[in-house]
Amino acid sequence: MSDATRTNANAPFEEQREMYELLSQETRHLVLQYVLAHPDHLPSLAELAYLIPKNKAAIRDQIHRLCEEGILSRYDHPPNEDSRDLPSQFYGLTTEGVEILEQYNYLRGLGMARALYDNTRLSERARRHRDAPRPELPEAVDQALRIDSTGESGDFERLEAYIRDRNARMPSVDDQVEVATALARDDIGPNHDGIKRAEIVEQFDIDLDFQPNTVLKNLLDIDILEEQRPPGPDIFAISERKDEIVNGNVTGEAKESLEALIEHIDDELHGVELDDGAAEWSSRDTDSTAPSVALADGAGRTVRSILATTFNIDPERVVEHLRSGNPVERLNTAVEAIESSEAVTKSEEYGRIVFVYPTYRYRLSQTAMELL
């Protein structure tokens, strides 16, 4: 480290403050982040300039400062010097730099940093620099920066301790640990689209003692999970008769469906079996679906009679009632009454307007990632 930093060797708290200040300055922090994220942990200046929204001179100055402090070093690859398209100078951590970053928990973010890098769109030149031949890092540095190929480089014990400390009194705490750990193993973090609640048990093949929604809510409450709202409307209105989304035309679709229902309001009679005391059919040739003047108790009801009972109005007022008020409420109430009745059969010509909320997805929060 520089002489300026070493002057505080006997004042550990001041030295710690200065180190935090050194590492947290925006440009230096980004330089270190992309050194850790790089597939070989040896980016060129041009690569860093592409990734960091600062001018190249400012980035170069901060790289030099990190080199002065012994955290970074320049690694040269002379064979590239004769090529105009390939860089010959790269920047990577020193052994001392690795020790410092490990002490200040930077290395815990290796997996996430790589995931962010892998999902960054690079220019043709940046890709060429990324794939260029480069020197090898010192063995100790290379070993410290390797990401476990199984993806289990995280410290699950810290994550579990955090959950148990904050939700110790929750009966579902064991389930919470199991779900959070499963998400961590599958790298379902802030850069992931997330997973649906219904998929958790099936995808992770885990046996929960509590309902998934209870477990997820407990983890949301302590900021271990975040709820990801899918893109698009906050709610979808679906017409059952069309089997399609009718957002923007909910009222119009409800009115059309009501008119289709009204067309069937006196249809769809069930055949009736007359009791001994019931009136007889008016003639032998009468259609079996047409009722006589008097029917057996409860038999031969029409859609109209079902809805008159539902809305507590006279049968002759049913059509007027359906066409008044909120068409969606009138339609849905009417269809539910018809579907729940055994006396009539609902036509496919009309149907409810069903409101569906998008399915939320869940993923580990940044707080969780910092514990791994």
Image (cartoon, rainbow, N blue to C red):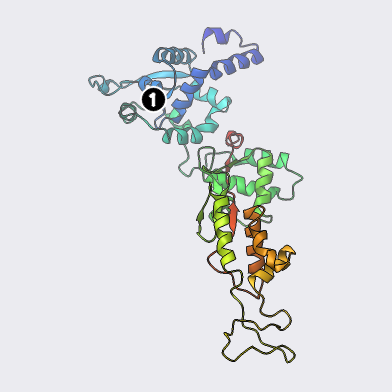
Give the side of residue 151 with respect to residue 124, left or right.
right
Question: 327 or 199, which is in the foreground?
Answer: 327
Q: Residues within 10 Å of mark 1 (few under 14, many from 20)?
A: many
Quadrant of the image for the C terminus?
top right
- Give the residue furthest to the right: 169
Question: 276 or 140, which is in the foreground?
Answer: 276
Give the side of residue 150 with respect to residue 19, left or right.
left
Q: Which corner quadrant of the image does residue 369 belong to?
A: top right
Residue shown at 65% from the left, 37% from the top:
223
Q: Is residue 218 visible?
A: yes
Give the total of numbered labels.
Answer: 1
Q: Is residue 204 visible?
A: no
- In percent of width and height, residue 364 lies at 58, 40
Residue shown at 44% from the left, 22% from the top:
52
Question: 315 or 252, which is in the foreground?
Answer: 315
Q: Amino acid at mark 1?
A: Pro
Mark 1, residue position: 43
Give the side of residue 86 with respect to residue 106, left or right.
left
